[in-house]
Image: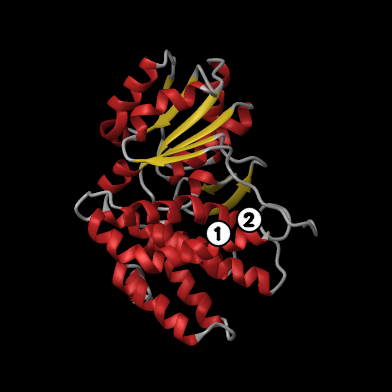
Amino acid sequence: MSKFNVLIAPRKYVQGRDVITKIGDFVAAISQKPVVLWDDQVKEIVGDKVIAGFQQSGIEFIDVNFAGDSTKAEAARVASIIKENNADAAIGIGGGKTLDTAKAAAHQSGVAMITVPTIASNDSPTSSYTVWYDEEGNCLGFESWGRNPDLVLVDSQVIANAPIRSFVAGMGDALATWVEAEACYKTRGGNLAGGQATVAARTLARLGYDLLLDHGVGACRAVEKNVVTPAVEKIIEANVLLSGLGFESGGVSTAHMIANCLPSVPECHGMMHGEEVGFGVISQLCLDEDFDPAEMLEIVDFEIAVGLPVTFRDLGLG
């Protein structure tokens, strides 16, 4: 671990309502022949807009169906398709596992890396990391590719149209960002960027935390009605960008270590990553003797208000 302060980030982040209709314009600056990794459900949601956007920009793309989990075998399969077709980019469109697989395949084949999340359930889109799972859904750990995506494209309306549960899960993942970054800072722990946290990383992590507590409940009410409001835009940015920058350049701690173990528990197989992290936050706070008790109660109240798990019973482990 370097003694230097290090911050890493994607080359370009674009967020806004209906921005996916402009995907061709943004991708054309990076790629003319990408592999697009997505599944049938995602194609039903955004397929027509993506295809139309590529056609308008004259982009020829290779359509690849995602097998369903971010396994090393799946990443190798996608990488081989990229090489066989002489593609120049890997675009992951969908949830975190699709994006993580596309990032791994991009690295393995030496092409550009692009992420297009259709849910804001975690902070995968901006990061250099892939979280690996086996065929049974057990988390095997995570691996950095040493570079972040060349482009992150986030359509706010697509996010708002997705199930509210995924939006809430993203808040659980984002809520941990500042809590864990502060724990790393206080203990002089390193970050995931290979050094110590910069002031900028810690500030971004705290900004995400403040946005969640100030606007999270209101944003949930809007997303329940599939409406994009200023509060929804703020929470999407907190879930995807601020959380992504904050966790990677700020560091992770107990909350994620607990969350990464839960997929191996049979009763937790139906949980989303951000829900598991939300429970991990509460667990970490119970272990932190220096954390302000009043702020801890505020966090617990927030998690309950938006529907994140705070007890073993909430996880199905009652």
The quarter of the image holding the N terminus is bottom right
Q: Secondary structure at mark 1?
A: helix
Separation of marks 2 and 1 at Cα, in angstroms = 10 Å
Q: Residue at x 70, y 74 (%)?
A: 187
Outermost residue to the right = 3
The image shows residue 23 at horizontal and vertical percentages of: 40, 28
Q: Secondary structure at mark 2?
A: helix
Query: Is 167 placed left or right of 96 in the picture?
Result: left
Provide the residue designation for mark 2: 249
Query: Is 151 placed left or right of 158 in the picture?
Result: right
Which class describes the residues within 10 Å of circle 1: few (<14), some (14-19), or many (20+)?
A: many
Above/below status of 228 relative to 27: below
Q: Residue at x 44, y 49 (%)?
A: 136
**Nearest the eye: 316 or 176:** 176
Above/below status of 201 relative to 136: below
The quarter of the image holding the C terminus is bottom left
Q: Residue at x 41, y 33 (%)?
A: 66
**Nearest the eye: 215 or 78:** 215
How many numbered marks, from 0 up?
A: 2
The image shows residue 301 at horizontal and vertical percentages of: 35, 78
Query: Is 148 placed left or right of 303 in the picture?
Result: right
Outermost residue to the left = 225
Q: Are marks 2 and 1 in contact (CB under 8 Å)?
A: yes
State which tag comes first along the sequence, 2 or 1.
1
Type of amino acid at the residue the image marks with label 2: Ser
Type of amino acid at the residue the image marks with label 1: Leu
Provide the residue designation for mark 1: 204
